[in-house]
Image (cartoon, rainbow, N blue to C red):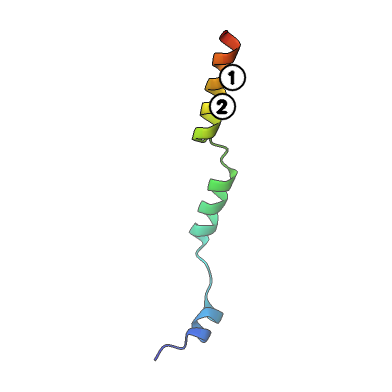
Amino acid sequence: MINFDEEIKNYKPSILIDDTEDAIYDNDLKDITDIVLEMTEDLRGRN
């Protein structure tokens, strides 16, 4: 039988997951809200 408490104690996260997480959080991509706000500001400036 698997001893889950022992398995959790021995758990070490993958280095790739940490690197991927850092890359995602460090990347400053525009989301749809930013794009819509920018388009709205452009349209208001044209009037």
Residue found 59% across the figure and 44% down from its top: 26
Residue at the image point whose x is 49% and y is 58% from the top? 16
Give the spatial CA distance, label 1 vs label 2: 6 Å
Element type at mark 2: helix
- Of residues 17 and 36, the one nearer the viewer is 36
Q: Is residue 44 above or below residue 16?
A: above
Is residue 30 in sight in this rendering? no
Vertical comparison of 23 with 32: above or below: below
Question: Which picture quadrant has residue 28?
Answer: top right
Residue at mark 2: 37
Residue 16 vs residue 28: left or right?
left
Instruction: Work out which quarter of the rendered image holds the C terminus and state it.
Output: top right
Q: Closest to the observer: 47 or 39?
A: 47
Q: From the image, tell me which residue sits under label 1.
A: 41
Q: Residue at x 52, y 75 (%)?
A: 11
Image spot of residue 24 (x, y percent): 53, 47
Picture coordinates of residue 42, whole percent (x, y): 56, 16
Q: Could you tell me which secondary element the residue under label 1 belongs to?
A: helix
Q: Determine crowd level at label 1: few under 14, some 14-19, many 20+ residues with C-alpha closer than 10 A.
A: few
> Disc count in the image?
2
